[in-house]
Image: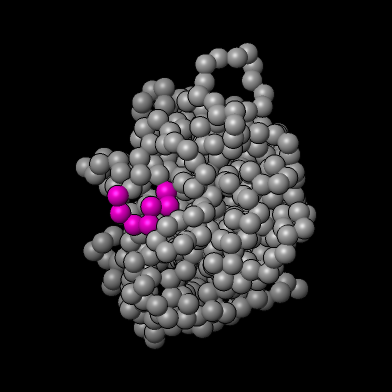
Amino acid sequence: SYIQHARVDGPLVMIGFGSIGRGTLPLILRHIGFEPGQFTVIEPSGGYAGLMAEHGVKHLQRALTPDNLRETLVGLFPDGKGLIVNLSVDVDSIEVMELAQELNVLYLDTVVEPWPGFYFGSPLPNAERTNYPLREKVRELGRKYQGGPTSISCCGANPGMVSWLLKEALLELAKDTGIAAAPKSREDWADLSMRLGVKGVHIAERDTQVSARPKPAGVFVNSWSVDGLLSEGYQPAELGWGTHEKKLPPLGHRFDFGAGYAIWIDKPGVDTRVRSWCPDVGPQFGLVVTHNESLSIPDYYTVWQGDQAVYRPTCHYAYHPCNDAVLSLYEANGAGVLQAEKHILTEAEITGGGDDLGVFLYGHAKGAMWYGSRLTIEETRALAPYQNATGMQVTSAVLAAMVWAIENPTAGFVEADEMDHTRCLFVQRPYLGRVEKHYTDWTPLKNRINRFAEDRDDEDPWQFTNFLVA
Ligand code: NAD
């Protein structure tokens, strides 16, 4: 009784069967058609072999490496058709994307992931351990493979869905402020954002999921990949840099190549806090963990006059992870050592809470607006198995991206900003709980417990310096 949105022609291969891979499985089984016996998962762990077998999915138990990647994928795609869903860690996305072009196979992932050795123990200087060079490399390849088989880079919840929500939010804001809007091209969207006076966008998230067991000392607990959070969290903080910004933050640096839409801060993202806002709690701290959408959104929404950027919004993640992850980070940062033991909270042990994940648009005529998905653990359990609320916002975006790739098979390299947000949200929406819009009169200059010295700009509340907790 579920809508089958699309059908894969040829083999369907998923790489990685972690929290996101397992959660995506039931959505694929419901909404994507494929030939019996044509669904394979490449996953080194045998921990969930039973789950795969139960659903008739083949398990290729193998860790992909630079040495076996080519022979493995060539063997799985003999006929020049099919689709790869890459949901692994430690597998170089760019290499798989190039191979998919060669094999004429559709591709999508949720992050630009490198082989091991980039995130930790790298000899590279910090400027080169950011996502900016990774994304610039993907964009450059995109120019080479124009019109090739569709290859979607970075399409989970964020990066991914938030780019679609941002478009809906801009249209809502236009409607609520009486501004005419019928954007079609990238230029139209950038122009609309400029006319609305949006100075910046937080990807504002609050994860309130809790379990009955207090976080044990020495264990890193999170609601999704611990490896994923640690990898991106200990890259330098990174953010799209708006044209309204007056000065760089302390330890902030520009990039000396590419279109210059972002800056990086010489501190880990998980130790870089900003003031932000989410509907569940109101004002809160968020972490400026680097993400692809902090780069793709400012790039997409830049208004150019010749080679001059005359408008661009500031954009970054402002992430309040689940409380156990906040404690885990406090512990790790204090010790200067990562915990050896890791744990992802399952839907079975979570006793309450949910995930508010949306876009927070500020600096416009109505002050600030949060627009996004509010999904509780109870709603999630009722919607589909094998995942918590955080997972479902990601897996349903992966589903939407699969559908879009199949329906648009020769789009070459794309990111979520370049996909049809209406179609994608149509597919995803049944899994997002309540999609809500909230206006607030909050600014980062409001609310202090006692006054202390701080670098404030009282003339413009929306300067990054006011958000940043120095
Ligand atoms: P996870 O840690 O639960 O699972 C990762 C899986 O990859 C594991 O099962 C692991 O065995 C497998 N793996 C490790 N090395 C491999 C190799 N060499 N070859 C094949 N498989 C290998 O992670 P998760 O929570 O499922 O997240 C998966 C990916 O999705 C991560 O890269 C994460 O950053 C990303 N993610 C993106 C978003 C988003 O919104 N864009 C959200 C959550 C996760």
Residue at image point 38% right, 65% down: 139
Is there any visible trace of residue 105 in the rendered image?
Answer: no
Residue at x-position 64% and y-position 68%: 183
**Farthest residue, direction bottom:** 79
Residue 456 lies, with reference to residue 435, above or below; the image says above
Report whether 155 appears left or right of 103.
right
In the image shown, does 211 or 175 lie closer to the viewer?
175
Residue at the image point whose x is 58% and y is 62% from the top: 191
Q: Is residue 63 left or right of residue 302?
A: left
Q: Secondary structure of the magenta portion, mostly?
A: loop
Span highlighted in magenta in the image: 256-262
Residue 91 relative to residue 153: left or right: left
* Relative side of 34 to 436, left or right: left
* Position of 457 relative to 58 (above/below): above
Task: Pick the quarter of the image with the N terminus.
Answer: bottom right
- In magenta segment, residue 168: no
Image location (x, y in percent) of residue 465: 51, 32
| Model colouring | one colour
Which is more toward the observer, 119 or 91? 119
- Image position, residue 424 (x, y; %): 63, 67
Image point 56% across, 61% down: which residue? Answer: 190
Within the magenta stretch, is there residue 260?
yes
